[in-house]
Amino acid sequence: NAGVTQTPKFRVLKTGQSMTLLCAQDMNHEYMYWYRQDPGMGLRLIHYSVGEGTTAKGEVPDGYNVSRLKKQNFLLGLESAAPSQTSVYFCASSLMVLQETQYFGPGTRLLVL
Amino acid sequence: DQQVKQNSPSLSVQEGRISILNCDYTNSMFDYFLWYKKYPAEGPTFLISISSIKDKNEDGRFTVFLNKSAKHLSLHIVPSQPGDSAVYFCAAISSGGSNYKLTFGKGTLLTVNP
């Protein structure tokens, strides 16, 4: 099992450009999450999904959109990137919402110039 | 307003000694607490958790203590090993309603010196 994988690992964008971050999990988990981590901050939830075809806003959703067309994939989109979105993005998945084991991907480092 | 606080950004201990990482929370609705460990350039990995109905949970070298009245939890690592050097995040969740949100602290960087 690959667990949770994220694509790409690193990306540089110019302000105003768009991109999509891909998260894939092969554990048949229902719940998937996107977090961002900034220096000196904990992980903050951007959006999450409780199942295929469903998404919901987290703590810091502005500027991002998500889609969960397939159970194994959770996409995070930036329509018009801003320097404030420079961060490390982590995807996670879990079988149940209170399952202690949220499995995290290795992260995507995004730099917006 | 931070609901989960890890007031020590860093901690340094000698190999073989005890490491104690602390975490405070303000939201009385939190009833499940977790510790995650993170190495550089990797995603966080789950370490240990505790439900609010317990005051202690032990897993090998790792023990988490919960003091509900003080809204405080701590992670003890005994004995500490150099491989334990990582950032440790405390996280909390409320099992009531439809809150799917894990609230994380800012993390504590633990360095275990050989």
Image: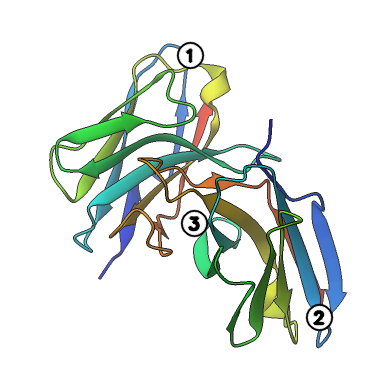
The crowding category of the residue bearing disc 2, from other C-alpha atoms within 10 Å (few below 14, some 14 to 19, many at least 20), is: some
Quadrant in which the N terminus of chain A appears: bottom left
Residue A26 seen: yes
Chain letter of disc 2 in the image = B
Task: Report the side of B46 relative to B37 (left or right).
Answer: left
Q: Amino acid at mark 2?
A: Ile
Q: Are marks 2 and 3 on the same chain?
A: yes
Q: Which residue is mark 3?
A: B43
Parent chain of label 1: A
Q: Residue B37 sits in which quadrant? A: bottom right
Mark 2 and mark 1 on one chain: no
Identify the residue under disc 1: A15
* Mark pair 2, 1: CA separation: 47 Å
Tell me: residue B88, above or below residue B58.
above
Query: Which three-letter amino acid code belongs to the residue tagged 1?
Result: Thr
Q: Quadrant of residue B66?
A: bottom right
Q: Secondary structure at mark 1?
A: loop
Q: Is residue A86 above or below residue A106?
A: above
The residue that disc 2 covers is B18
Residue at left offset 42%, top offset 24%:
A61
Foreground of the two, B83 or B23: B23
Spot occupied by residue B54 in the image (x, y as percentages of width and height): 58, 72
Q: Badge 3: few (under 14), some or many (20 or more) residues near its Cα, within 10 Å?
A: many
Please give the name of the residue rendered at 28% of the width and 66% of the height, measured from the top-left corner: A2
> Residue B22 vs residue A52: left or right?
right
